[in-house]
Image (spheres, grey):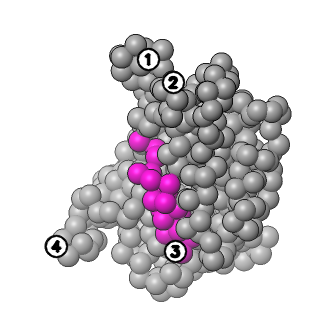
Amino acid sequence: MSNTFRLGVVINPFAGIGGSVGLKGSDGADIRDKALAMGAEKLANEKMGRALNVLKGLSGFTVLTAGGEMGEDCSKQLNLPLEVIYQPKQSPSSADDTENAVRALIAHGVDLVLFAGGDGTARNVCAIVGDKVPVLGVPAGCKIHSGVYAVTPSAAGEVVKRMLTGELVSVRQAEVRDIDEQAFRQGKVQSQHFGEMQIPDELSYVQSVKMGGREDESLVLNDIADYISELMSDEPDVLFVMGSGSTVNQVMATLGLPNTLLGVDIVKNGEVIAADVTAQALLQAVSNAPARLVITAIGGQGHVFGRGNQQLSPAVIRAVGRDNIWLVATKQKLQQLDGRPLRLDTGDEALDEALAGIIPVITGYQDKVYYPIV
């Protein structure tokens, strides 16, 4: 995995075209054709351009997108580093093309999906993304009832800019909603819930803060511990490998379990089934059962592996898998890195390269940020 931030971009070129001609929506080919016949202009590319323009002059990222009006044209006009990974199957493009483009972005390991459209587009994106990666909508449609959109196109660009420049950006769940366009044209607003997606949000402290906006570390550790213990209770058949360090120790205390502060324990169904395990015993355990690794950054340089947790051998980490690593840390600890990335030193350069990139870090109760690790 490259250390370059991979920004997925998808545009519904026809989003919002029904609004200016009074059609109160743009869902469906018949409405799209009618709007175009009435002289409606396509503005979705212009709005995505306003978002992406905020990123001009920045480095360390690549835009992955679909061909033509679905993202390629807009990105080329701004001279952004670009890779086209999907071509629309038909012209004009369809909702199927939106879903297929998002599916291709996911397969290419994007760190964020930035899409332009309305609530119908959000539904298409949600159907593919689920909670796989964070998304952010650039408002371009007639209907913007979903909570996954930034307030303006430029605001969307500012949030992405914060991610690219190393600022801490929280991630939260947001609702995808859409209304019945036929009923809306008759003056009735019938809104329906279609799912939720993760969106990057401006760094905010909703709970566990002191005056002045700084975290109370002990309270935040409690929040993290409560959230992890809640997640663990949902998976009674999974082995949880509990790494060393004070943050993980707090999780174990919340669970009411004994903990090896400078060692690695295994928890299953709310009980410690192995304490202070060796690398060999750990490998045998995680090779024969589904497992997750709960670990924190340790050491003054933000090391995740290779400092005081050698029991987590390259073979163990590979057996667990990158997607099953739950990295926990307070935002205060991350901010103390002063923009430096988290560090990998597994002893296996190929594994370090595979783990590198952008990784979610659980920083509070139902709160996480995305942070670089190299």
Residue appearing at x 55%, y 67% in the figure: 54
> Which residue, given by chain and number where applicable, does mark 2 sit on?
23
Residue at point 39% right, 55% down? Answer: 367
Q: Kindly identify the residue that appears in the image at 66 percent across and 47 percent down.
A: 10
Can residue 300 be seen? Answer: yes
Q: Are marks 4 and 3 in contact (CB under 8 Å)?
A: no
Nearer-N-terminus badge (4/1): 1
Give the main secondary structure of the magenta stretch.
helix
- In contact (CB < 8 Å): disc 1 and disc 2: yes
For the residue carrying disc 1, how many other residues have a C-alpha within 10 Å: few (<14), some (14-19), or many (20+)?
few
Label 4 vs 3, first from the N-terminus: 3
Compared with 215, 290 (above or below) is above
**Residue receiving disc 4:** 211
Q: Which residue is mark 1?
A: 185
Percent x, y of residue 108: 75, 52
Q: Is residue 114 left or right of residue 4?
A: left
Provide residue 159's location: percent of width, then percent of height: 48, 62
Q: Which residue is mark 3?
A: 166
- Mark 1 falls on what kind of element? helix
Answer whether residue 159 is magenta in the image. yes
Instruction: Give the distance between the C-alpha atoms of the residues marked 2 and 4, in whole angstroms.
Output: 50 Å
Question: 249 or 325, which lies in front?
Answer: 325
Check the image and report above or below for 249 versus 46. below
- Corner quadrant of residue 124: top right
Q: Position of residue 224 (x, y in %)?
A: 35, 58
The segment highlighted magenta reads 147-166
Indicate whether residue 31 is drawn in magenta. Answer: no
Q: Earlier in the sequence, mark 2 or mark 4?
A: 2
Q: Quadrant of the C terminus?
A: bottom right
Q: Quadrant of the N terminus?
A: bottom right
Determine the CA span between mark 4 and mark 3: 25 Å
